[in-house]
Image (cartoon, rainbow, N blue to C red):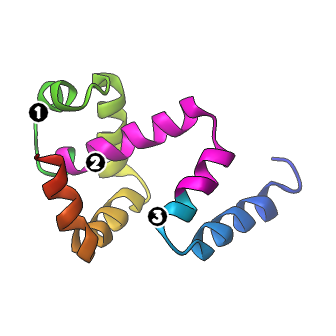
């Protein structure tokens, strides 16, 4: 591991925690990530609620267009990872904006 990696990693996480709203996050991540990297992150997050709700992988693929391989990888980390997906999903699901976000997806 590069000597500055740990310090840079901590700085990145702390910086993300300072962002105050969705627009600030969008701007930061669009500068930080290539379009393909950002799409990969969004794809992974998009399937988390469906996996947590027990939908079959093929159905999730049909709904999202995300590959079954990626869905399987996310499912593995949702089950055997460090708990990040579960914690974020729990916090997102209980946030006041989550219900509005979910209802907009159904339109």
Query: Callout 2: few (<14), some (14-19), or many (20+) C-alpha neighbours within 10 Å?
Result: many
Residue under circle 3? 22
In the displayed structure image, the side of residue 8 where residue 66 appears, left or right: left
Q: Which residues are magenta?
A: 26-50
Camera-nearest label, 3 or 2: 3
* Residue for point 47% across, 42% down: 41
> Does the residue at mark 3 contact the one at mark 1 (Cβ under 8 Å)?
no
| Quarter of the view holding residue 42 | top left
Residue under circle 2? 48
> Does the residue at mark 3 contact the one at mark 2 (Cβ under 8 Å)?
no
In the displayed structure image, the side of residue 47 where residue 103 appears, left or right: left
The local secondary structure at tag 3 comes to helix
Whether the magenta-drawn stretch holds residue 29 is answered as yes
| Quarter of the view holding residue 62 | top left
Residue under circle 1? 56
Point out the tag, 3 or 1, that comes first from the N-terminus.
Answer: 3
* Residue for point 55% across, 29% down: 36
């Amino acid at each position: 591991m590069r000597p500055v990696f740990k310090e840079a990693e901590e700085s990145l996480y702390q910086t993300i925690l300072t962002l105050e709203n969705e627009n600030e996050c969008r701007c930061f991540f669009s500068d930080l990530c290539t379009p393909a990297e950002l799409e990969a992150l969004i794809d992974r997050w998009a399937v988390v609620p469906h996996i947590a709700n027990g939908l079959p992988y093929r159905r999730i693929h049909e709904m999202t267009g995300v590959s079954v391989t990626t869905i399987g990888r996310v499912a593995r980390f949702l089950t055997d990872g460090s708990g990040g997906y579960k914690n974020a999903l729990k916090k997102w699901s209980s946030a006041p904006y989550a219900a509005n976000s979910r209802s907009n997806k159904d339109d």
